[in-house]
């Protein structure tokens, strides 16, 4: 409080707080002493005190009805919202971080490419698209699966909270298995260099080598990935996503990646569900 | 923590209704001072209690009263926004709306010192204050909250509360002193 001495005239704010008894004991005493010796300030204080008293004497009224809530409303009450929701909200981000970390570990362990691993690209169409979307493919127009590309682009590009709302648009596409679309909701995550590994990770560990019967779907993964790296589709052969699949350590890594990815998708669904539930109540 | 509040948080609507009964007079009077009309004040109060019940999970600590008043004040702001205007400021409107009458049953308010024109003048002057000053002043001088509770109810700092109360009170004082003859003798400034 600014008021410090008896000779100093208190401000209106100080006088008001003084009337309300909202000053520390020091300033209260000082102002009380000042008011005893300063007629102008005393009159000022009196008028403010009068105003306060008049307001306090305004008639109050009793409500004409009771406001108690009916038992039906009890069903509408959300459970303690914030504390319960937050784990759901952040779980996708955590799972995704783990997944990306595993991809990064995988990447750092890859110093060489082996031609044998090229068959990893021959994955089911869904897994290929999933991996592609997970990589935040910025050039969807060139793809056969335009629907997927469009849905991916229309979503907020962030994980976490953004990811939850993203699931509102197409909950039906969400499944525990890496599916097209869902991974795309991780938009904005993996660095470009993570694409090949993301593709490998999203594929089932024993992904059946799909014959080139569906050449276009195979091309989705390879061409999109290569476009981002400045390669032409014809360079696909030189594109090697990882080390030899027979490596035991890498297999473990793959399993972990798949586990983390599945956890991400599941937690995304749970987060969306929990958000929808809480919003439905408000 | 208030046992009723704890039980209400666990989903016990009977416990919450005990809190409603304890606070409904406070809430409805606050709404009346902010909206200026009795029926709308009761509607806003009901809305506030429903919102409070639904939002109970978001209440931190044991500060139910200011938290509830904040919800009520926000309900009133929403209502004013819907109306697109301030609470009725004309004396005629205030009179036409009918000033609240104490119920037949139940305790009468304190000896009614403020009658007729003076009461109307104060009501109108109060309604002419800026929203935030009016809310702070009502919470302080009419509802009797301390500054800390008011700061919580208004979601602002103590300094801002002090300032709003001081300015609102001074403004109201200036209006009243323009017609000192209306003031009860004991309140008239000494000449």
Image (cartoon, coloured by chain):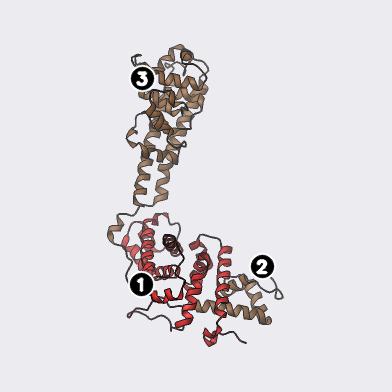
Chain colours: A brown, B red
Residue in view at x 50 percent, y 62 percent:
B154
- The mark nearer the N terminus, 2 or 1, is 2
Name the residue furthest right: A7
User: Where residue A2 is drawn, which disc sits there?
Assistant: 2
In this view, the residue in front, A6 or A98, is A6
Q: Is A180 located above or below residue A8 in the figure?
A: above
Residue in view at x 58 percent, y 71 percent:
A17
Residue B116, quarter of picture:
bottom left
Q: Residue B61: x and y, percent? A: 45, 58
Left or right of A169 on screen, residue A58: right
In this view, the residue in front, B25 or B119, is B119
Q: Residue B131: x and y, percent? A: 50, 65
Element on which disc 3 rests: loop
Q: Give yes or no for contact between labels 3 and 2 (Cβ–Cβ under 8 Å).
A: no
Q: Nearer the viewer, mark 1 or mark 3?
A: 1
The CA span between labels 2 and 1 is: 43 Å
Q: Residue B87: x and y, percent? A: 45, 68
**Tag 3 residue:** A207
Which quarter of the rendered picture does the N terminus of chain A lie within? bottom right
Q: Is B125 located above or below residue A242 in the figure?
A: below
- The mark nearer the N terminus, 1 or 3, is 1
Q: Residues within 10 Å of mark 1 (few under 14, many from 20)?
A: many
Element on which disc 1 rests: loop
Q: Residues within 10 Å of mark 2 (few under 14, many from 20)?
A: few
| Residue A249 makes an appearance in the image | no
């Amino acid at each position: 409080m600014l008021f410090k001495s008896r000779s100093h005239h208190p401000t209106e704010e100080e006088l008001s707080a003084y009337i309300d008894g909202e000053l520390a004991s020091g300033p209260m005493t000082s102002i009380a002493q000042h008011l005893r010796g300063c007629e102008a300030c005393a009159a000022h204080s009196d008028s403010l005190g009068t105003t306060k008293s008049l307001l306090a004497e305004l008639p109050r009224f009793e409500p004409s009805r009771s406001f108690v809530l009916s038992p039906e409303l009890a069903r509408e009450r959300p459970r303690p919202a914030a504390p319960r929701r937050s784990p759901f909200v952040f779980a996708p981000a955590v799972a995704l971080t783990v997944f990306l970390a595993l991809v990064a570990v995988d990447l750092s362990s890859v110093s060489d490419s082996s031609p044998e691993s090229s068959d990893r690209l021959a994955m089911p169409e869904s897994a290929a698209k999933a991996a592609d979307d997970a990589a935040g493919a910025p050039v969807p127009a060139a793809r056969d699966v335009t629907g997927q590309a469009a849905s991916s682009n229309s979503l907020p590009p962030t994980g976490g909270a953004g990811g939850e709302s993203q699931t509102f648009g197409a909950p039906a596409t969400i499944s525990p298995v890496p599916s097209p679309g869902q991974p795309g909701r991780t938009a904005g995550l993996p660095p470009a260099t993570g694409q090949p590994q993301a593709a490998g990770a999203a594929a089932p560990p024993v992904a059946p080598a799909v014959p080139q019967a569906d050449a276009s779907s195979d091309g989705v993964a390879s061409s999109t990935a290569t476009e981002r790296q400045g390669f032409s589709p014809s360079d696909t052969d030189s594109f090697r996503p990882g080390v030899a699949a027979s490596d035991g350590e890498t297999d473990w890594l793959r399993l972990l990646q798949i586990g983390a990815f599945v956890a991400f998708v599941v937690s995304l669904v749970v987060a969306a569900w929990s958000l929808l539930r809480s919003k439905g109540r408000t | 923590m208030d046992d009723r509040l704890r039980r209400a948080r666990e989903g016990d609507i009977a416990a919450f209704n005990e809190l409603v009964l304890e606070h409904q007079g406070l809430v409805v009077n606050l709404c009346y001072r902010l909206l200026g009309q009795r029926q709308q004040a009761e509607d806003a109060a009901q809305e506030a209690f429903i919102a409070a019940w639904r939002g109970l999970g978001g209440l931190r600590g044991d500060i139910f009263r200011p938290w509830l008043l904040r919800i009520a004040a926000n309900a009133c702001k929403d209502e004013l926004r819907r109306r697109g205007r301030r609470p009725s400021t004309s004396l005629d409107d205030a009179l036409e709306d009918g000033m609240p009458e104490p119920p037949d049953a139940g305790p009468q308010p304190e000896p009614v010192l403020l009658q007729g024109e003076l009461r109307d003048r104060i009501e109108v002057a109060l309604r002419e204050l800026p929203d935030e000053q009016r809310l702070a002043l009502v919470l302080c001088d009419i509802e009797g909250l301390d500054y800390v509770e008011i700061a919580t109810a208004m979601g602002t700092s103590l300094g801002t509360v002090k300032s709003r109360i001081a300015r609102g009170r001074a403004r109201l004082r200036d209006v009243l002193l323009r017609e000192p003859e209306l003031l009860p003798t004991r309140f008239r400034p000494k000449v």
